[in-house]
Amino acid sequence: GDDSALLRLRDLDVTYGRAVRAVRAVSIEVPHGAVVAVLGANGAGKTSLLRAVSGTLPLHGGTVDGGRITVEETALTGRDPAAAVRAGVVQVPEGRRVFAGLTVAENLRAGTLGLRGSGRAARISTALDRVFALFPVLADRRGQRAGLLSGGEQQMLAIGRALMAEPRLLLLDEPSLGLAPRMVSLIAEVITEINRQGVGVLLVEQNAATALRLARHAYVLDVGRVRLAGPAARLAATDEVRRLYLGEA
Ligand code: ATP
């Protein structure tokens, strides 16, 4: 138990219906100021883990039926997405879902719907400046419909929209999926910068090479269980990770 953890998952169990045990007794910590990666093959349980933290599991027919989720002092186990957002937890779903018929600016504005507290207008304006500084292309295209953006630009918009909600912890689900290598590097740089600005990041990736470069700590999930865990540099050097997840001989 590290008292400085931003996110702490303890013995988490996730199921869908009666038969599918997607996550089993998983314990994971994201320290303050860290990028933590969760790796694993298709179906390992990575997305289910993020849904449990963001409170969106019931929307997909799943439940947390064991363990605890805490963000600093706030218990999030079994809470809804609004509670997660209030605690500063925001998920960027897989597949860069943006509102295709809305403009870039309208998509970003949609990220602020859960914002509470005083000085809302000023905070939104600050957040917008920050997103446009991170992704200048979004500023250039603010009036354009999101459906007309490239895949990489839509991923930027999905991340930008999440940042508009003032997250303390960003949950990223496969941000590099289907993107060209140049775009993967750009997104990786931006994740590092967002983290440098004080946001904790829990990054789910099948692209182990990118994730292990970005992250301080990493966990490897296999059929719902933590199979390996440790400092990212150390995991990247193990035979098992090199062979199974980095595609080396
Ligand atoms: P992927 O990269 O394909 O998203 P993953 O590691 O994120 O893989 P999950 O999507 O969390 O894995 O899936 C874990 C297990 O839960 C799999 O057996 C999957 O079939 C099952 N599962 C995921 N979503 C649902 C759902 N909505 N209903 C029923 N079973 C589901």
Image (cartoon, helix red, strand yellow):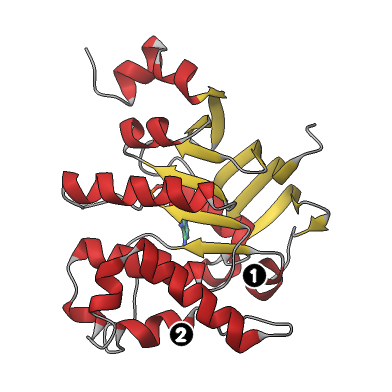
Q: Residue at x 64, y 60 (%)?
A: 63
Residue matched to label 2: 109
- Location of residue 89 in the rendering, given as x and y in whole percent from the top left corner: 62, 62
- Location of residue 69 in the rendering, given as x and y in whole percent from the top left corner: 73, 51
Classed neighbour count for the residue bearing mark 2: other residues with Cα under 10 Å, few (<14), some (14–19), many (≥20): some
In this view, the residue in front, 195 or 175, is 195
Residue matched to label 1: 85
Looking at the image, residue 128 lies above or below residue 242: below
Q: How many labels were placed on the picture?
A: 2
- Location of residue 81 in the rendering, given as x and y in whole percent from the top left corner: 63, 71
In this view, the residue in front, 213 or 135, is 135
Q: Residue at x 35, y 53 (%)?
A: 175
- Amino acid at pointer 1: Val
Q: Residue at x 63, y 65 (%)?
A: 55
The C terminus lies in quadrant: top left
Do we see residue 206 in this rendering?
yes
Mark 1 / mark 2, whichever is N-terminal: 1
- Amino acid at pointer 2: Arg
